[in-house]
Structure formats: C-alpha cells, structure tokens
Amino acid sequence: MKDKEKQQSAARETKGAKSKLRKWSKNKWFWPAAYLSACAVLLGTYFLIQSPAGTDQAEEEQEPIGEEEDFAGGNGETGEEDSMPTASGDETMQMPVTDEESVDIIGYYYDHDAAAEEQQDALVYYNNMYYQNKGIDIAGSDGESFEVTAAATGEVVNVEEDEILGQVVDVKHTEDIVTSYSSLEDVKVEEGDTITQGSVLGMAAKNLYNSDAGVHAHFEIRKDGDPLNPNEAFHQSLQALSTSDNNEEELAQDEETNPDEDSSTLEEFPILDGDEEGEEGEKEKEEDKDTEE
C-alpha cells in the first residue's frame, strides 16, 4: 500500500510540473529566456575548456620576446660582452699574475733618467748585442712556470708564435693602451676574444731572446705605441696612464741618439771583442806613422 501511495504522489508531482511547464511555455518570454540560458551554458563551458590552453600559449609567445629584450638590452652574457670590448677608464692596472707574492721581477724597464747601475740591470743581452728592456721580466720564486693573467680588461688583438720571443699576446684596452705578454706557452686565448682583468692568457716559459732569465714572462705597457714603465703603471687607473707624459723625454732622446734607425723599439749596443779593439788600435798607429813620414 505504501509503495502505491508513493507512486501515486510521484505521478501527481510529475503532472504538476508538466502542467506548470505548459503554463510557462505559453508565455512570450519563456522560449527566448530558455534559448539565452542554453547559449550561456555552452559559452561558459567553451571558455572554461579553452582558458588553460590559452594561458599556456600566451606564456610561450612571451618567452622569445623576453629573450630578445635581454639580448638587445645587454642583460644577457652576450650583450654584456658586445657592449664592453675594453676596460673602463677607472680600472687600475695590475701585475699580470694571480699571486704577486709568488713571483719576482728579475728584469727591469730601461729608464733614461735612472742611475748607470740601474740602466745596466735593464739591458738584455742577445746575439752579441745589448738591448734596452722596454718592459719587465717576471719569474716565479721557485723557478717554475706560473699562470700569466690579463693586467686589465680588454680585447685580444694579436696572438702569434715568435721564434725568438716565444708565444706573444697583445691586449688592447681603453684610452689607446695596449699590454703585451711574451715568453709564453699554452696560450688560452685567441685573437678577437674579450677578456676581463685576471683572465688567464697562458703559462710562463723560456725564450731565446732572454735565455738567461730562464722560465719567465715578459710584460710591456704601451700608450699610442710608446712604452711606459710598468712598475710606475701598476695600481694606477687607465685614465691616469692615458694622460701621463712620462715617456716624451725618453722618445726625444731616442730620436736624437738614433735618428736614422728603424721604428723598432729596441736600441742596440754592439759588443766589441778584444781582437777587434786590437785591430783598430793597430790601424790607428799605422795611420799616425804615415802622417809623421
């Protein structure tokens, strides 16, 4: 009995709902409202499904734009290297080694204003000639090879193998300053590389030009092609070095002493053997006898 009553009550409710739906459907607003509701449900479902994919697509499109901005603005590593080929003017010149305490200066820059003994210590003997040292020679305290580093940030403008000087590396910095490193081996850089201060250029080695120095590195600083004293340049800013005129008197003396010499920065002092001196003395004596007769 109870089941029959439940079925009868459910049938009455269904009939009531149908009768209400028939009444509403007779109204003019019913069908437009039903249509709009169905459209709203369909559109909502569509956007709900498409929204995650659209977000991912937008993120993918934005990533290359960000990379292009970093490249153009110099935020990436490539942008920084391209925008800074040389050192800033306030960077100071450093000794071209990783540890100054582990090396000694064994060859000195030839200074025209120095005492005679100091000038003698700044001569390099090669091929029966004495040459004025245009830089300094650095050797390890233990006599072993050591890493030779860039004295300042710059661009490598020359890397070559020289039969006399060993491997040579030239680095150009700001204000027309160039540092030169020779008597090297196992060079780590190539021409065109942009390097920072302290970058390893190669290892100290031996060369024929200054064989008496053993394992060492030769270091020079040039301003507009003219040599500067490295000992006076260390720990000075590149801007200060660019305005120094400490080499003008030296150049004037060089030109007056050797006006017909080539543009080489080396000045030669020939060594005369005792036999040659004796021959010259005998010639002078013979000339004097001829004059007296």
Image (tube, rainbow, N blue to C red):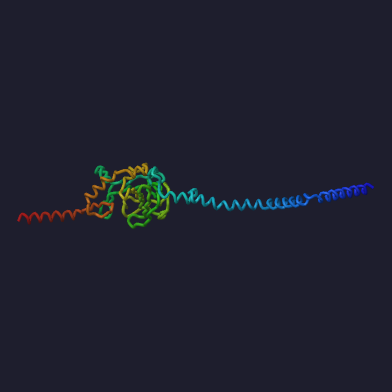
Q: Residue furthest front?
A: 28
Residue for point 80% across, 49% down: 27
Q: Quarter of the image holding residue 243? A: top left
Residue for point 31% across, 43% down: 244
Seen from the viewer's position, the closer of residues 33 and 137 is 33
Q: 142 above or below 190?
A: above
Residue 219 image offset from top left, x and y in percent: 35, 49
Q: Relative to residue 280, is residue 166 drawn left or right?
A: right
Residue 9 image offset from top left, x and y in percent: 90, 47
Q: Relative to residue 289, is residue 26 drawn left or right?
A: right
Q: Relative to residue 102, is residue 291 drawn left or right?
A: left
Q: Is residue 61 something that shows in the picture?
A: yes
Residue 194 image offset from top left, x and y in percent: 42, 51
Residue 246 image offset from top left, x and y in percent: 29, 43
Residue for point 12% across, 54% down: 284
Q: Relative to residue 136, is residue 35 drawn left or right?
A: right
Q: Is residue 149 something that shows in the picture?
A: no
Seen from the viewer's position, the closer of residues 138 and 71 is 71
Q: Quadrant of the C terminus?
A: bottom left
